[in-house]
Image (cartoon, helix red, strand yellow):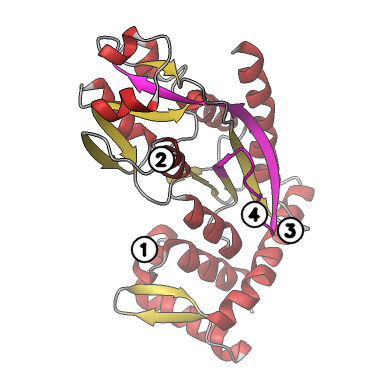
């Protein structure tokens, strides 16, 4: 058994495809497939389910995956202890819901890059359920998700609260809603509304806020970034956590602004997750600590 065999399994699991894993690892697909087959024969277990649409970890492989990741983490720690500063660190993968705050994410990644010049950071926008699954399967090292006040934290993860904010109405400055001190549900229903698709926390919140009523016209989109662009282009208003809008480049340029929701006291939490593991690579720990530190500075400045 060789370390690269375990790295290949981790790459195929993360990317969901032998072809994409081969491209990332700079191998031919037959060579990658044969290496994985040799490991499967040695272990006596089919680690992957191979389909025409791609490859995914098998049920038996999923049981072994935490052990595979622990070995890879141990190798990282060994290399760190040896002081090998010239090695190319493995990529740190961050899954984030699209309502996570750009003013926190971008500065943190930039600062991490300055202190870890050879470590790549992959930022993947995904729904909350996909982030949970990716963390458990090893596809993500960290996950940034939103929770509404009163939601239970998911089991099996270390959860760190980064930010606490409130849902707000995001509008163009020339929108009639921008003339209001606070926006109520009836005012939202009267105009076009950009809503997050089902599966996002803010979709659930808006459905609850409107009591199941539907607006005069609505768009559905996948995440806050597209929602803010649609608002800036005058297609309607949307409802997002305040920390997703305040400080955003569009808000700083005056293309969008926010108004509070009348009579609503709901809190939204931005939470950083990582799977329970006795071995956390140094780069992942460092990125985690940067998010915590920068979130504290962000809240202090707000």
Mark-to-mark CA distance, 3 and 2? 41 Å
| Horizontal side, residue 144 vs residue 281: left or right | left
Helix, strand, or loop for circle 3?
A: loop
Please state, as top left, top right, bottom left or bottom right, where the N terminus lies in the image.
bottom right
Instruction: Work out how far the residue at label 2 is from the one at label 1, CA to CA, in angstroms.
Output: 44 Å
What is the number of the mark on residue 154?
4
Few, some or many C-alpha atoms within 10 Å of disc 2 (few <14, some 14-19, many ≥20)? Answer: few
Q: Residue at x 53, y 61 (%)?
A: 133
Residue 263 shows up from this direction? yes
Q: Nearer the viewer, residue 45 or 145?
A: 145
Distance Cα–Cα, label 3 vs label 1: 27 Å
* Of the two numbered discs 2 and 1 in the rendering, the one whose residue sits closer to the viewer: 2
* Between discs 2 and 1, the one toward the N terminus: 1
Q: In the rendered image, which residue does mark 1 sit on?
A: 20
- Judge from the rendering whether residue 208 lies leftward or rightward of residue 290; answer left or right: left
Identify the mark nearer the N-term, 3 or 2. 2
Q: Secondary structure at mark 4?
A: loop
Q: Which label sits on residue 211?
A: 2
Up/down of 183 relative to 15, above or below: above
Kindly report which numbered mark, 2 or 4, lies closer to the viewer in this rendering. 2
Question: Residue at the location (58% across, 35% down)?
Answer: 270
Residue 155 part of the magenta segment: yes
């Amino acid at each position: 058994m060789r370390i690269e065999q375990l790295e290949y399994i981790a790459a195929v699991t993360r990317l969901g495809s032998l072809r994409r894993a081969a491209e990332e690892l700079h191998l031919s697909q037959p060579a990658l497939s044969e290496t994985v087959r040799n490991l499967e024969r040695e272990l006596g277990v089919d680690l992957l389910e191979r389909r025409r649409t791609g490859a995914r970890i098998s049920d038996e492989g999923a049981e072994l995956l935490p052990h595979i990741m622990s070995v890879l983490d141990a190798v990282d720690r060994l290399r760190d202890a040896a002081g090998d500063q010239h090695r190319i660190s493995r990529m740190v993968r961050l899954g984030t819901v699209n309502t996570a705050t750009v003013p926190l994410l971008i500065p943190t990644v930039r600062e991490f890059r300055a202190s870890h010049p050879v470590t790549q950071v992959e930022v993947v926008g995904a729904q909350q359920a996909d982030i949970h699954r990716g963390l458990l399967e090893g596809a993500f090292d960290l996950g940034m998700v939103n929770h509404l006040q009163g939601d239970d934290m998911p089991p099996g993860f270390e959860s760190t609260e980064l930010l606490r904010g409130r849902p707000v109405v995001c509008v163009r400055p020339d929108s009639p809603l921008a003339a209001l001190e606070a926006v109520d549900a009836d005012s939202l229903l009267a105009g076009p509304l950009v809503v997050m698709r089902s599966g996002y926390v803010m979709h659930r919140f808006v459905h609850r806020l409107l009591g199941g009523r539907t607006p005069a016209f609505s768009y559905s989109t996948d995440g806050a970034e597209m929602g803010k662009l649609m608002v800036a282009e005058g297609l309607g208003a949307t409802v997002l956590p305040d920390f997703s809008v305040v400080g955003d480049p569009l808000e700083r340029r005056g293309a969008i602004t926010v108004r509070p929701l009348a009579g609503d006291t709901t809190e939204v939490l931005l939470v950083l997750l990582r799977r329970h593991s006795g071995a956390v690579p140094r780069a992942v720990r460092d990125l985690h600590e940067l998010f915590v530190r920068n979130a504290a500075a962000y809240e202090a400045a707000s």
